[in-house]
Amino acid sequence: MELKKKRVIYWHPAFYADIQIELKDEADKLTFENEHHLSKKPMQIDVLIVKKEKAGPIRKNIGRIFKKHNVIEYKSPGRSLGIDDFYKVYGYACFYKADVTRADSISAKEVTITFVSERYPRNLIRHLRTVRKYEVEKAEDGIYNVKGDVFSIQILVTKELSEKENLWLKSLTNNLKEPENARKLIEDYQKNRENNLYQSALDAILRANEKVFKEVNGMSIEDTFMEFVQEKFDHRLKEETKKAIGTAVEKAVGEAVEKGVVVPVEESERRAEAARLTERVSLIWKKCAKNKSLSDIAEEMETESEEVLPIYNVIMQNPGKTFEEICELVVG
């Protein structure tokens, strides 16, 4: 009996993308760092967000407490936010504040700590109230302010966050139940398909919630994700094709101008044919990227295999070359 492979979900890259999506409207005020290293030792902050000079206050609900230096700790779905996690990250914030060349150049009043967890950390909050003597107040759905320390501290419970305000953070789970939420994610992704952050976040959410996404469009998770990847690939290939054609034409015209040569009609036609051939290369290139066989490519292009074979061979024999380099080999 063949054992089913356990699907690996890379939550932290998705969270790093998610938090940038959530704060995208004010990204010009912020600088994001993934896995900010505190020292040469294996001690690092999950996400460090530094507010830019002279930037105004952050209006987004999860960033209202942000000051100059903002330390973020993220717990993947299924992992709880415990008491020791608080002290570990609090220590990171202290180390970050002290790891400077000039004494007190980072003011403690300019440091904030944000803890992000899918579930409500009941034991930690009880500890903060009874042992640390902090006040923990619910600011709004999923956002808890911790008062009583020199650092400004908040706890984000993603499960409780507002779907309207925080769709992507709320959806960073392996327990997405509502098909409507999956549909909203896809629709939002489609509006922002040129942004790599959305692809990174959606990849993790898709793979962790295969069933609910299948209900939305009837496709397997591999088909759904490949549709997004292919869409991005097609767009990039189209741009590279235009660039390759433009480069070839500019080079030929430039050489002709330098030599004082008037390009004859036959030469113009030859260049037009080269452009058409480049388009043909792009079509075969895309099909090869999908691992389609020579016969399948020929059938889809409604031609004979012999017509496709020369370009097909060049592509298959040069897997490390760029599209422009392949065009150079084929078109010359």
Image (cartoon, grey):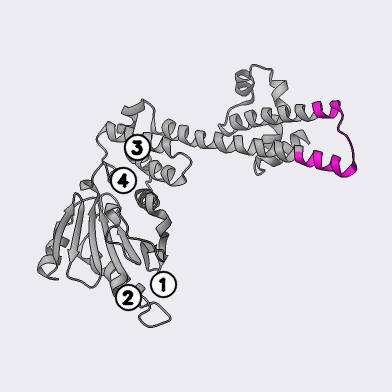
Of tags 3 and 4, the one toward the viewer is: 3
Q: Is residue 2 visible?
A: no
Image side of residue 76 versus residue 125, left or right? right
Mark 4 residue crowding within 10 angstroms, few (<14) / some (14–19) / many (20+) = many
Q: Is residue 106 placed above or below 83 in the rendered structure?
A: below
Q: What residue did someone put label 3 on?
A: 185
Q: Nearer the viewer, mark 2 or mark 3?
A: 2
Of the two numbered discs 2 and 4 on the same chain, state the one appearing first in sequence.
2
Q: Disc 4 on helix, strand or loop? A: loop
Q: Main secondary structure of the magenta part?
A: helix
Q: Which quadrant holds residue 286?
A: top right
**Disc 2 versus disc 4: distance between alpha carbons?**
33 Å
Name the image quarter holding residue 268: top right
Q: Which residue is mark 4?
A: 172
**Residue density around tag 1, few if under 14, some if 14–19, many if 20 or more, within 10 Å:** few
Which amino acid does the dot numbered 4 rest on?
Leu
Contact check, label 2 and label 3, Cβ < 8 Å? no
Residue 88's spot in the image, x, y percent? 28, 68
At which x and y percent is residue 82? 21, 61
Where is mark 2, residue-wise?
Answer: 107
Give me the C-alpha separation between circle 1 and circle 3: 38 Å
Could you tell me which residue is drawn at 31 percent across and 69 percent down? 111
Which comes before the other along the chain, label 1 or label 3? 1
Q: Earlier in the sequence, mark 2 or mark 3?
A: 2
**Separation of residues labelled 3 and 4 (CA atoms):** 11 Å
Helix, strand or loop at label 2? It is: loop
Q: Which residues are magenta?
A: 250-269
Is the Cβ of the residue at disc 3 closer than 8 Å to that at disc 4?
no
The crowd level at tag 3 (other Cα within 10 Å; few <14, some 14-19, many 20+) is many
- The residue carrying mark 1 is 41
Q: Earlier in the sequence, mark 1 or mark 4?
A: 1
